[in-house]
Amino acid sequence: MKVVALAGGVGGARLADGLAQNLPPEDLTVVVNIGDDFDFFGLHICPDLDTVCYTLAGMANPATGWGLAGETWNALENIGRLGGPTWFRLGDRDLGTHLERTRRLAKGEPLSQITGDFCRAWGIQLTVLPASDDSVPTWVYTDEGEMPFQEYFVRRQCRPSVSGFRFADVDRSSPAKGVLEAIQRADLVVICPSNPWVSVDPILAIPGILPAVMSRPVLAVSPIIGGRTVKGPAAKMYAELGIEPSALSVARHYRKFLSAFVLDREDAALQSEVQALGVKALVTATWMHTAADRRQLAAECLSLGSALL
């Protein structure tokens, strides 16, 4: 079975790793959100791409889920000593990724080609693609004005109240080479337990991707468990937008193209309401504390996905 996973953030990276443990590399493509990308110290930072790739390569910091294991912070500490900004945590090893990516982008190489080369260097055999080679930054509308996503998420630590989102220049963007082809070949599209508003929607907003996804069976895993998010501000965003933060709300968010939905045992009472949307629903353990948890959840997703074919 050929699978395309749409991913962003730590939850997306972990399920992508679980899928990689269950599928031959030639049968899995991970399409990653680029709405979080931004420039810092003149370097092009791709937080979601790097989190997914570091996780798939077995290099991610196990304590945080992002960044590199065994990281040091000498450069950042010196920046702070010199009076520079340190609100975005760039480790010494991580800087190497951003330096080389920025150098190659400046030469005119597309982000998708650079990502593929990085994956090969890190021993990742499956295909990882940015959703687009174009810049499509996410902006957040808040009670303190509109601000870039990383300003809201990292520097302001999600404190401002959210009222909406904007994906700048998305109408002028196009999918990265290979994205539409992978979706059109896929037997199943898996939406990982990533933030629907700022990890998945930026992917689907890129012209051509949503129609391609709607042509395939789609399975989504809820990032909200018991009204809370495992990581990140998705539940807070739902509440501030006037929507009850729940697994059911996530299923409704995707309902126009959703074929199957996976929710945690803590939300078993919502299964019938999800099924009332015309969606197959699976209740299982969705917390991914270990590599074995990732593998098991992914295996159950693939089993449910097979039943859709």
Image (cartoon, rainbow, N blue to C red):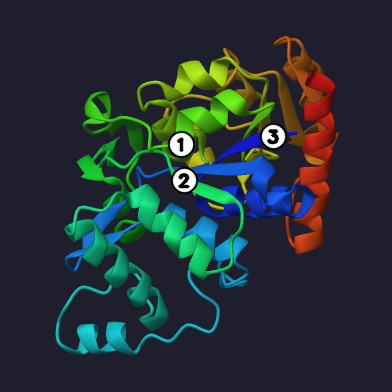
Q: Determine the CA span between mark 1 and mark 3.
A: 14 Å
**Sequence-first tag of 3 and 2:** 3
Left or right of 298: which side holds 168? left
The mark found on residue 67 in the picture is: none
Identified at 54% across, 22% down, the residue is 213
Q: Which residue is mark 2?
A: 129
- Indicate whether 161 appears above or below 273: below
* Residue type, numbered disc 3: Lys
Q: Determine the CA span between mark 1 and mark 2.
A: 8 Å
Please say if the residues under marks 1 and 2 sit with CB atoms less than 8 Å apart.
yes
The mark found on residue 2 in the picture is: 3
Residue 68 % position (x, y)? 50, 74
Q: Which residue is mark 1?
A: 178
Identified at 28% across, 38% down, the residue is 136
Q: If the image is split into quadrants, where does the C terminus sit? A: top right
* Residue type, numbered disc 2: Leu
- Indicate whether 264 appears above or below 89: above
In what element is the residue under mark 3?
loop
Q: 85 or 227: nearer the eye?
A: 85
Q: 32 or 176: nearer the eye?
A: 176
* Residue type, numbered disc 1: Gly
User: Local crowd at mark 3 within 10 Å, few (<14), some, or many (≥20)?
Assistant: some
**Sequence-first tag of 1 and 2:** 2
**Sequence-first tag of 1 and 3:** 3
